[in-house]
Amino acid sequence: MRSRCLVVSIASPLGRLPSFPCAMLGLALLAAHGPHALAEGAFSLTSASFRAGGAVADPQVFNQDDCKGGNRSPQLSWHDAPPGTRGFAVTMFDQDAPGRGWWHWSVAGIPATVTSLPENASSSGFLSKLGAVEARNDFDTDGYGGPCPPPGKPHRYIITVYALSTVDLRLAQGRPALMFDHEIGTATLGFARMVVNYGR
């Protein structure tokens, strides 16, 4: 069963902001624009791979060292993007990793005509055929890197689809995820979000 997530929409394009992890963008916007800048709207995210609040399954888990998963990026679909959307970006961020968190995935340059990604879009070449570009994740590889936290308490993973005012963020394949995060923040019209969990 697909599950819809809590959605937050931004009424107008953002100005230039300092670099914030995408997981903290909502708080940054609230601080910059006040409590009325964020409002629940229709922009929504669903997934055949994830259930909001549920556990990440093996196909989406990282495949390296003692993490033995398929490392397949999740299937995602989004609906009712804000008016004026000219492109999309997708990120996956572990807010519970030590320090500044951990970037698992960041994609920009998804055309406005695209409203879903198939499972394994990262490794299959689907994204590159669209003209999209993927950041270097914190495993130091380009594209998707699934959850692989240290043993202990499960971590929370934030998957966000951003509706953007432009499809061209002047980003290149393999640039750092923090650079993607900053440029996405400069063009965000709204976002739809889902949080999932994984522990070992």
Image (cartoon, grey):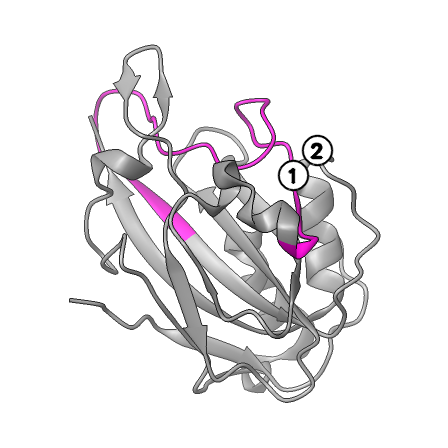
At 57% from the left and 32% from the top, the residue drawn is: 137
Is 171 placed above or below 17 here? Answer: above
Is 3 placed above or below 74 here? Answer: below
Q: Residues within 10 Å of mark 1 (few under 14, many from 20)?
A: many
**Whether residue 131 can be seen here:** yes
Amino acid type at image mark 2: Gly
Is 124 placed above or below 148 here? Answer: below
- Residues at badges 1 and 2 in contact (C-beta under 8 Å)? yes
Q: Residues within 10 Å of mark 2 (few under 14, many from 20)?
A: some
The image shows residue 82 at horizontal and vertical percentages of 58, 85
Residue 187 in the magenta stretch? The answer is no
Residue 62: quadrant of the picture? top left
State left or right for residue 174 relative to residue 37.
right
Q: Which residues are magenta?
A: 130-158
Amino acid type at image mark 1: Ala
Residue 18: quadrant of the picture? bottom right
The quadrant of the picture occupied by the C terminus is top left
Residue 138: quadrant of the picture? top right
Give the total number of marks visible in the rendering.
Answer: 2
Give the residue number, with chain letter if any, for mark 2: 174
Q: Earlier in the sequence, mark 1 or mark 2?
A: 1
Residue 154 in the magenta stretch? The answer is yes
Q: Secondary structure at mark 2?
A: loop
The quadrant of the picture occupied by the N terminus is bottom left
99 or 150, nearer to the observer = 150
Query: Gap in Å between the C-alphas at discs 1 and 2?
Result: 5 Å
Give the residue number, with chain letter if any, for mark 1: 135
108 or 159, nearer to the observer = 108
The image shows residue 32 at horizontal and vertical percentages of 68, 71
Residue sitting farthest toward the right? 170
